[in-house]
Image (spheres, coloured by chain):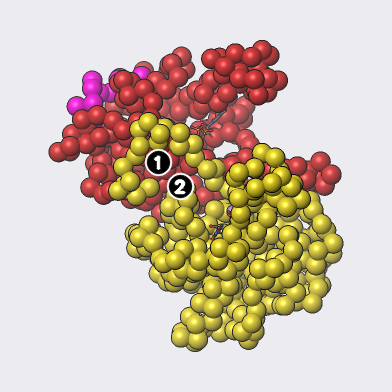
Chain colours: A red, B yellow
Amino acid sequence: TIFFITPTYARPTQKADLVRLCQTLKLVDALHWIVIEDSDSITPLVTNVLDRCDLNSYSHVHERTPKSMQRKICTKVNPRQGCPHHLLGKEEALWKKPRGVMQRNRGLSVVREVAAERNIVKGVVYFGDDDNTYSLHLFDLMRTIKKAGAWTVGLSGGLMHEGPRVIDNKVVGWHVGWRPERPFPLDMAGFAINVTQVISKPSLEFSSSAARGYLESEFLKQVVASKDELEPKGFDCNCVWVWHTRTEAPDLKGEKHSPSDKSIEV
Amino acid sequence: TIFFITPTYARPTQKADLVRLCQTLKLVDALHWIVIEDSDSITPLVTNVLDRCDLNSYSHVHERTPKSMQRKICTKVNPRQGCPHHLLGKEEALWKKPRGVMQRNRGLSVVREVAAERNIVKGVVYFGDDDNTYSLHLFDLMRTIKKAGAWTVGLSGGLMHEGPRVIDNKVVGWHVGWRPERPFPLDMAGFAINVTQVISKPSLEFSSSAARGYLESEFLKQVVASKDELEPKGFDCNCVWVWHTRTEAPDLKGEKHSPSDKSIEV
Ligand SMILES: O=c1ccn([C@@H]2O[C@H](COP(=O)(O)OP(=O)(O)O)[C@@H](O)[C@H]2O)c(=O)[nH]1
Ligand SMILES: O=c1ccn([C@@H]2O[C@H](COP(=O)(O)OP(=O)(O)O)[C@@H](O)[C@H]2O)c(=O)[nH]1
Ligand SMILES: [Mn+2]
Ligand SMILES: [Mn+2]
């Protein structure tokens, strides 16, 4: 079983992103999708996407990011704190707070529950954000992971592709645009772990206090000691199998003079 | 048969967009995908996407937009010509030139060829851009179109949803953010036509000289006389089945100091 953990939050493009992700996941055998809404309760919108999509196996839960962990409104200029001049009066910069942390941890609890209920001992756990692009071949690659596997992610970290440097099927270093000295300078979409790691380590989780860019490193350190233990995947092709795409926030300026019908679910 | 016509052009997110679109189209029965590259020849990247995706039926051609129709570099400020101050020295604004016109016309020729070769007389023709989001249900809706069908598109035209206003299964007006006086103020993703229209009208095509926002109207006027003839689809739900999403251009600033390996296809 592939446990595919997806945090998601309300925004104009949410339904579109979830619909196309679900349609991709329909094509994958033996996959259990875990959708964790960043909200106080599960919403009709996400419920409708899941009903309509007709996936074989999924869990739908919610876990609200506490106010203290949400981004704040910039009240004074301090670029190092994520408040450059142009954000004054707006939300602090994206990198100021980790996104989806509480939700992924809730997802890990769901993995433990579902694995226990269904006696699942074989499988992998992957953190798949709702707006990335996944090639079907990625799922084949990750099924063979023994402990922790890693691969290249397209359009990530300020680069066309970002990931491990591999020689003779060993991770020997990293192609990254930023802080190569991190223990595991990988994007969330660039690794997966065997489900036994999650089951046997009940306290394995993401730390909401990880320094910027260290979320993945702090997590993987609990699974593997160093890059020597990482299993490189997908390096048999000169290509990537997953892309850190982002969906543009739509221009909604027409809403001022021609407001849309709120009863229509978009 | 649904003929799904997709213009596409080279950019960092092209492969990601085509991979996820192809994975959606794999789930649709009796569909023929027509991919028209805006390039001087077909490219290995798009060829690889199509090979790997393993769709049942598709055509892969190219049609380069002539230089005269491409956007120009702004040499002086003139906002009405698509050159506001911040674009000085850059490409003129997106709306300055229609996008994908030559490619869609080439797609219509391919429809005529394929229909003739395979004796296809039943079906619909739809213009599906490479970065939109399509729910599988949209394909069920369009199969019953007799002449021209229309529906609501999410995240389009500066609104949450944009499309026909429908009473008693008749189009009575429009919910649009802009120029409601256009004959058919519809987005490209908001209509489809019966294939017999394309076969019986060999000169049916998009006009590259249509005024801004009139591309769809000028086209549909060749098929239906007025909105009374349009067949509304999908209004049985308070929801939309297609979204005009756009994929963000990625930040590639790390490429300056850590250039990526160009031999890796992203
Ligand atoms: O307040 C938030 C922001 C993001 N997310 C989810 O966390 C993941 C990562 O967020 P995003 O895609 O915005 O981050 P980025 O693309 O910048 O890495 C996505 O699945 C989001 O839906 C969330 O649950 N709550
Ligand atoms: O120079 C271009 C620009 C766009 N397109 C294609 O035309 C369609 C519409 O373009 P785009 O999605 O950029 O337009 P928008 O989202 O702004 O309507 C897409 O399938 C693009 O891949 C193209 O073939 N050549
Ligand atoms: Mn994202
Ligand atoms: Mn588009």
**In magenta segment, residue A230:** yes
Whether label 2 touches label 1, CB < 8 Å:
yes
Q: Is residue A247 above or below residue B32?
A: above
Q: Residue at x 20, y 30 (%)?
A: A172
**Is residue B155 among what the camera can see?**
no
Tell me if B247 is positioned left or right of B53 in this view: right
Snapshot quadrant of residue A126: top left
Depth check: give the residue in front, B96 or B139.
Answer: B96
Q: Amino acid at mark 2?
A: Pro
x, y percentage for residue B166?
80, 62
Q: CA–CA distance between discs 2 and 1?
A: 7 Å
x, y percentage for residue A190?
35, 35
Q: Residue at x 54, y 35 (%)?
A: A8
Residue extent of the magenta highlight: A216-231
Tell me if B124 is positioned left or right of B181 in this view: left
Residue under numbered circle 2: B12
The numbered mark 2 sits on a residue in which chain?
Answer: B
Does dot 2 land on a helix, a strand or a loop? loop
Q: Is residue A112 above or below residue B212?
A: above
**In magenta segment, residue B242:** no
